[in-house]
Image (cartoon, rainbow, N blue to C red):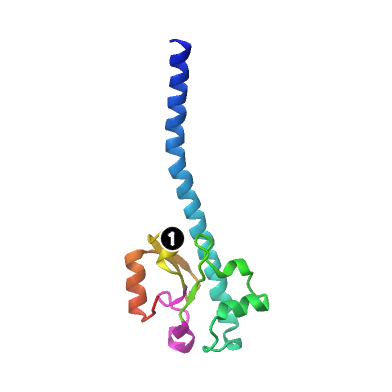
Amino acid sequence: MSRRARFRFVVAVAIVLVAVAIPSWLHSRDLTARLACGSNMKGIATALKVYSGDWSLDDPDPIAMLIAKGEIPASAGHCPASGKPYRINRAYFTAPHAQNSSTTVVVFEELANHDGIGANMCYSDGHASFEKAGDVQRILVAQRISE
């Protein structure tokens, strides 16, 4: 094999390796952002439940109140993937029968935050999960939450 042929072979192998590695690297970045997002939501939901007596439903942004009090870091008030703020299900705090339910949403985000694939939702029992786009719409409609 000539020197030129070996060089072409090495370049071809390198191109194939890069082509295989880039999609998995991008997927891992998205997965990391989803996990950080879910973790942020769990912290916000916990802080909202602990400090629910300190804010009024008339308060336009309870998350900003928590940040101002130093209860959560400013970086936790929005999705790391998009930079958009999280949304709160205000009805949760006025419906005592919904407390600690594994199906009642406390904090959620817009579908656009993760390219429309789905969205993280944090439930009143403390768990957060990434729901697919169709499920997000179904959950929000069932709980009469407007996105």
Asked whether 113 or 21 is in front, the reply is 113
Q: Is residue 91 left or right of residue 70?
A: left
- Residue under the image location 44 percent in, 85 percent down: 91
Characterize the local packing of mark 1: few (<14), some (14-19) or many (20 or more) Cα atoms within 10 angstroms.
many
Write the residue at 60% across / 66% down: 75
For the C terminus, give its image quadrant.
bottom left
Horizontally, is 29 left or right of 53 in the view? left
Q: Secondary structure at mark 1?
A: helix
Residue located at (45% from left, 63% from top): 113
Left or right: 54 in relation to 84: right
Instruction: Give the residue number, with chain letter if any, for mark 1.
Output: 114
**Residue 94 is a magenta residue:** yes
Residue 130 visible in the displayed image: no
The total of numbered circles placed on residues is 1
> Residue lying farthest front?
4
2 relative to 141, above or below: above
The image quadrant that residue 19 belongs to is: top left
User: Visible in this render: residue 97?
Assistant: yes
Could you tell me which residue is drawn at 52 percent across and 69 percent down? 41
Q: Please tell me in which quadrant of the rendered image residue 138 appears.
A: bottom left
| Residue 12 locus on image (x, y percent) | 43, 26
Look at the image and tell me in which quarter the N terminus lies.
Answer: top left
x then y, percent, for residue 79 = 52, 65
| Residue that sits furthest to the top in the current view | 2
Which portion, as a residue range, is magenta? Answer: 90-107
User: Is 49 inside the magenta-drawn segment?
Assistant: no
Type of amino acid under label 1: His
| Residue 90 rendering spot, x and y as whole percentages | 47, 83
Q: Position of residue 15 (x, y in %)?
A: 44, 31
